[in-house]
Image (cartoon, grey):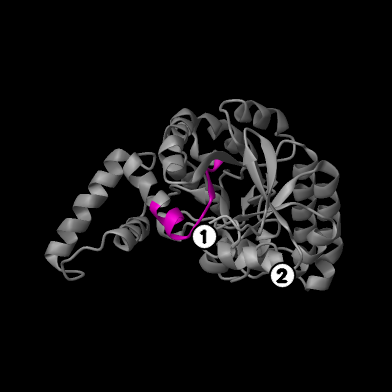
Amino acid sequence: MLYYVDYHMHLEEGPYSFRWLDRTNQAFDHFHPIAEPQHSRAWLEASYARMHTRLQRGAYDESWLDLYLQEALRKGLREVGIVDHLYRFRETLPYFERHLDIGDSPLGRLQHTWLHQVCTERMENFAAAIQAAKPRWAEQGVELRLGLEADYFAGGEKDLESFIAMADWDYVIGSIHYVDGWGFDNPETQFRFDQVDLCELYGRFFDDVERMINSGLFDIAAHLDNLKVFNYRPAEELLLPYYERIAQALKRTNTATEVNAGLFYRYPVKEMCPSSSFIDVLLRHDVPFTLSSDSHFPDDVGKYVADNALMLQQRGQAEIATFHQRKRIMRPLATSTS
């Protein structure tokens, strides 16, 4: 059997729309279906009651975390890393206000609204909740790890160092979700892709990815080609030189990356991250890999982890990267342990 891990999942995201309410209710249904007919008054009352409780208790409550554990056990996961986006924490609001375009323009106003909709939590509360849950998960045979997903901006390294020092993380993920202050994976800002030269855009994106890796701040470089999120992309052969540069930077800095399934099942591009040819380049450079679902709800925990573990094994990968107290531990991908 294979050693299944999922090192990139989130407890909550926002914005807090009716769509968010519906998706959260769907997650509850996965574990505890409501007996009453859907869209009946009784069904709505039952849905309202559990959603009211969920909102009152928040995402860090044991009852919500235990759904993640249930799905991890169902999927046969041995290790799970739960992260939160840096922009979720109120302590980091000035950092994002400096680096995002939140000016008086259609994009700026949209991003200003979004930022204040999602920046609602305290870092210490998140870290404490995950640390408190670790023994409970270990009793069930799953190692729980505490992670942080930190958005990198060139020039923001000192701020990031101070944020990373605020908790005892098991690992820190570096990610790029913004180019020139534009949050490119937000469906409401997708229009910007039609206003830029894609080759130039990808060049700036991979420059930032390389700077992020070279900063030495991160244990994992996340979803290395997520700029393809809405399927705006140059021909793959034009991107191969960037793939080589990124692979060399990861190898030089001894930084791991991930096979991230999030874009495959949640976004229009419907492709794993990195792309198949990008994975080939990374494997040639012996870059360490971990696995992630990038789930934002408990029913998506471990999604496509088994598929991607098998894919790595079939391409000759013998080990998978895991983390504890900021140290990487390479586990055999294939194990006879049940």
Residue at the disc numbered 2: 314
177 horizontally vs 15: left or right: right
- Number of numbered discs visible in the structure rendering: 2
Q: Amino acid at mark 2?
A: Gln
Residue at x-position 21% and y-position 63%: 34
Compared with 268, 284 (above or below) is above
Residue 158 makes an appearance in the image: yes
Residue 196: horizontal and vertical position, in percent? 72, 63
Residue drawn at (42%, 34%) of the image: 129
Image x and y of residue 164, in percent? 62, 30
Q: Which residues are magenta?
A: 70-85
Q: Quadrant of the N terminus?
A: bottom right
Front residue of 100 and 39: 39
Relative image position of residue 101 (x, y in whole percent): 61, 45
Helix, strand, or loop for circle 1? helix
The residue that appears at 86% across and 52% down in the rendered structure is 248
Residue sitting nearer the eye, 77 or 220: 77
Q: Is residue 302 left or right of residue 196?
A: left
- The answer to which of marks 2 and 1 sits earlier in the sequence is 1
Q: Which residue position is annotated with label 1?
A: 188
